[in-house]
Image: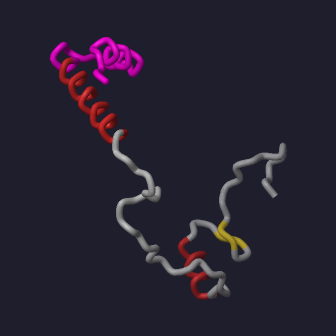
Amino acid sequence: MAISKEQVTHVANLARLSFTDEELGQFTDQLSQITDMFNELQEVDTTGVAPMTHVVDLVNVLRPDEPAPANPAERDALLHNAPDAQDGYIKVPAILDNGGTDAE
């Protein structure tokens, strides 16, 4: 399926792009080649080929996400780095106002 210069110009106008005549010709040729490649791929018989999301088999290298008891030393280190803490929690500015001056 060949892409016409009019189609490229139309899409360029929608994207608020402007091209010189040379660039327009170059993009028209490139987009035509891309659509030709897709058409060629459509002809490949993929019967019996399992769908995949990646061409390489990947294995999750992270540890399992399992609940564990909190370590007080880690909590203290976290709170030490927080700009403001209160009663063992990180204190942040209120983002919702219920009509009052305090976010409690």
Q: Quadrant of the N terminus?
A: top left
Q: Is residue 29 left or right of residue 67?
A: left
Vertical comparison of 81 with 22: above or below: below
**Nearer to the camera, 12 or 78:** 12
Residue drawn at 34 percent across, 45 percent down: 44
* Residue 69 seen in the current view: yes
**Nearer to the camera, 81 or 10:** 10
Residue drawn at 31 percent across, 18 percent down: 8
Farthest left residue in view = 22
Residue drawn at 24 percent across, 31 percent down: 33
Residue drawn at 44 percent across, 77 percent down: 61
Vertical comparison of 100 with 77: above or below: above
Q: Quadrant of the C terminus?
A: bottom right
Residue 22: x percent and y percent? 15, 17
What span is in magenta? 1-24
| Quarter of the figure with residue 91 | bottom right
Q: Is residue 44 left or right of residue 98?
A: left
